[in-house]
């Protein structure tokens, strides 16, 4: 993979590629762009190539379906709000919004629908699987740890499901980039979930496979220098970057249809879908590279996650995962810098 900078603006019909640093635009850019769209196949899963060997989650149809279910869970869990997409007090007059780690682009697309006057940019390491986007919704492939080339400052920067994306230094760098590229008074918001599977009534046996998942996968992530405790560190990291008026909301996202409340039961069903579709991808790269006492085989990973799926499907197991939303403001009197 070339070390030259590649920035792809994703047009669902055209797939426009732009790269001012490459002399032979037609041949070299198209070649690199094609490689980005193809990705790399490992253990039967497709991964992005923009930051090769540096991101653990697949970018394939199954993983995008998991993200779609996760998007729905987040919406149901904040379904009592007029706007379940974010809690930062964003004005309808906002002009520029950035969605980092846009994944399948659903959050950016939905926000573009409710804020049609704003330009919504969604950026990730792999092209989202979209066939249509609203006007003023722009989905891009780029590495946010590189220099930002957007000319405008943003009114709002959003992140979601980014655990394990960066090491501690990279997170600090990213939060500072967000701070410097926000308008004075602009907001940042991040929603993350915990890798641990829990229950409050001991219906999840301690010797179950599901009970081992959290510590197993967090251990792999730490050995990969991509710690997955973002849910616990993001508030302090956001404050460290200079943000003020920090607020948060904690959740328990049920896994499976066990809750009695109709809406929470719906969230549980959707969250089981997210886990059922996503868990193999969450574990495959990490376990086959950083598993203990030695790297696991693909077959071992598949057998492990199959057992966890079966345990989570039982209505006798009242399992959930923790999630947290944090939002904060850039001070009005600090213009920041590029």
Image (cartoon, rainbow, N blue to C red):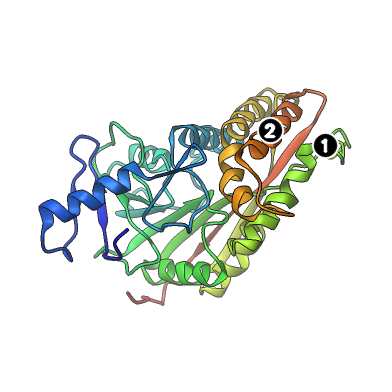
Q: Nearer the viewer, residue 126 or 182?
A: 126
* Residue at image coords 67%, 48%: 195
Tell which circle, 2 or 1, labels the residue nearer the N-terminal end.
1
Q: Quadrant of the C terminus?
A: bottom left
Q: In the rendering, at what x and y percent does residue 261 appear?
A: 72, 25
* Residue at image coords 65%, 58%: 229
Q: Residues within 10 Å of mark 1 (few under 14, many from 20)?
A: few
| In this picture, residue 133 sits left or right of residue 73 | left
Q: Secondary structure at mark 1?
A: loop
| In this picture, residue 29 sits left or right of residue 110 | left
Seen in the picture, residue 200 relative to 229 is either above or below; the reply is above
Q: Nearer the viewer, mark 2 or mark 1?
A: 2
**Residue 287 seen anywhere in this rendered image of the structure:** yes
Q: Residues within 10 Å of mark 2 (few under 14, many from 20)?
A: few
* Residue at image coords 11%, 64%: 23
Q: Quadrant of the N terminus?
A: bottom left
Res 247 quadrant in image:
bottom right
**Residue 119 seen anywhere in this rendered image of the structure:** no
Q: Which residue is mark 1?
A: 208
Seen in the picture, residue 90 relative to 310 is either above or below; the reply is below
Q: Which mark is residue 158?
A: none
Q: Nearer the viewer, residue 330 or 137?
A: 137
Label 2 to label 1: alpha-carbon separation: 14 Å
Q: In the rendering, at what x and y percent does residue 143 appear?
A: 37, 60
Q: Secondary structure at mark 2?
A: helix
Q: Which residue is mark 2?
A: 303
């Amino acid at each position: 993979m070339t070390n030259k900078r590649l920035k792809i603006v994703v047009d669902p019909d055209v797939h426009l590629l732009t790269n001012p640093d490459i002399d032979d635009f037609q041949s070299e850019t198209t070649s690199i762009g094609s490689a980005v769209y193809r990705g790399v196949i490992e253990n039967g899963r497709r991964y992005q190539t923009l930051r090769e060997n540096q991101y653990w989650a697949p970018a394939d149809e199954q993983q995008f379906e998991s993200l779609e279910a996760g998007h729905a869970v987040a919406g149901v869990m904040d379904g009592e709000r007029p706007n379940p997409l974010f809690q930062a007090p964003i004005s309808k007059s906002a002009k520029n919004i950035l969605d980092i780690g846009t994944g399948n682009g659903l959050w950016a697309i939905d926000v573009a629908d409710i804020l049609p006057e704003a330009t919504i940019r969604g950026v990730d390491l792999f092209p989202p699987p979209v066939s249509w986007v609203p006007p003023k919704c722009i989905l891009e492939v780029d590495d946010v740890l590189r220099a930002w080339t957007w000319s405008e400052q943003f009114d709002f920067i959003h992140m979601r499901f980014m655990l394990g994306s960066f090491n501690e230094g990279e997170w600090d760098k990213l939060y500072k980039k967000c701070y410097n590229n926000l308008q004075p008074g602009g907001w940042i918001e991040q929603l993350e979930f915990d890798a641990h599977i829990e229950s409050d009534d001991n219906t999840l046996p301690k010797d179950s496979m599901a009970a081992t998942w959290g510590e197993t996968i967090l251990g792999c992530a730490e050995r990969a220098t991509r710690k997955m405790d973002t849910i616990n560190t993001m508030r302090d990291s956001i404050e460290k970057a200079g943000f003020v008026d920090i607020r948060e909301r904690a959740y328990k996202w049920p896994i499976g249809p066990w809750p009695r409340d109709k809406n929470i039961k719906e969230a549980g069903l959707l969250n089981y879908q997210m886990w059922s579709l996503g868990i193999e991808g969450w574990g495959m790269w990490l376990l086959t590279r950083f598993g203990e006492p030695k790297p696991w085989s693909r077959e071992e990973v598949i057998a492990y996650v199959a057992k966890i799926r079966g345990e989570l499907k039982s209505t006798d197991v009242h399992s959930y995962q923790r999630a947290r939303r944090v939002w904060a403001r850039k001070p009005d009197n600090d213009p920041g810098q590029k």
